[in-house]
Image (tube, helix red, strand yellow):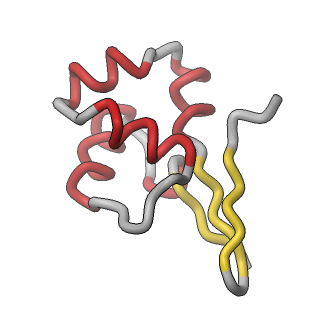
């Protein structure tokens, strides 16, 4: 089963790839939550694409911690 969540919107779709990145790096949600001081619900929403707005401060904190780019976590395609 794919760890990438595809969320369709009007003229394209978003790919939420945090779960895949965590799996590839061997990092648990709980470790990410503790080490980045990010709420569990926020991380789960970012993994599942169950959100309306993305907090860029939280996204930057997660990218810094994982040493990755934003597009490694969230990507928009048309």
Q: Answer with left or right where residue 7 lies relative to residue 58.
A: right
Q: Answer with left or right where residue 1 lies relative to residue 27.
A: right
Residue at coordinates 41% horizontally, 21% vertically from top-left? 29
| Count of labels in the image | 0
Q: 49 or 22: which is nearer to us?
A: 49
Q: Residue furthest bottom?
A: 11
Q: 48 or 2: which is nearer to us?
A: 48
Residue at coordinates 78% horizontally, 35% vertically from top-left? 2
Residue 75 sits in quarter: bottom right
Q: Where the C terminus falls, by quadrant? A: bottom right
Is 63 placed above or below 71 here? above
Q: Position of residue 35 (x, y in %)?
A: 22, 22
Residue at coordinates 52% horizontally, 13% vertically from top-left? 26
Q: Answer with left or right where residue 19 lies relative to residue 8.
A: left
Is 15 placed above or below 41 here? below
Q: Position of residue 46 (x, y in %)?
A: 45, 46
Is 15 placed above or below 39 here? below
Q: Position of residue 45 (x, y in %)?
A: 45, 45
Q: 55 or 24: which is nearer to us?
A: 55
Q: Residue furthest left?
A: 37
Q: Position of residue 42 (x, y in %)?
A: 34, 42
Q: Where the N terminus falls, by quadrant? A: top right
Q: Answer with left or right where residue 28 lies relative to residue 30.
A: right
Residue at coordinates 67% horizontally, 61% vertically from top-left? 7
Q: 63 or 4: which is nearer to us?
A: 4
């Amino acid at each position: 089963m794919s760890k990438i969540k595809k969320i369709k919107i009007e003229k394209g779709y978003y790919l939420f790839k945090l779960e895949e990145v965590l799996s590839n790096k061997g990092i648990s949600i709980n470790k990410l939550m503790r080490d980045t001081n990010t709420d569990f619900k926020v991380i789960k929403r970012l993994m599942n694409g169950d959100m309306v707005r993305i907090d860029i401060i939280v996204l930057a904190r997660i990218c810094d911690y994982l040493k990755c780019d934003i597009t490694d976590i969230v990507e928009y395609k048309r």
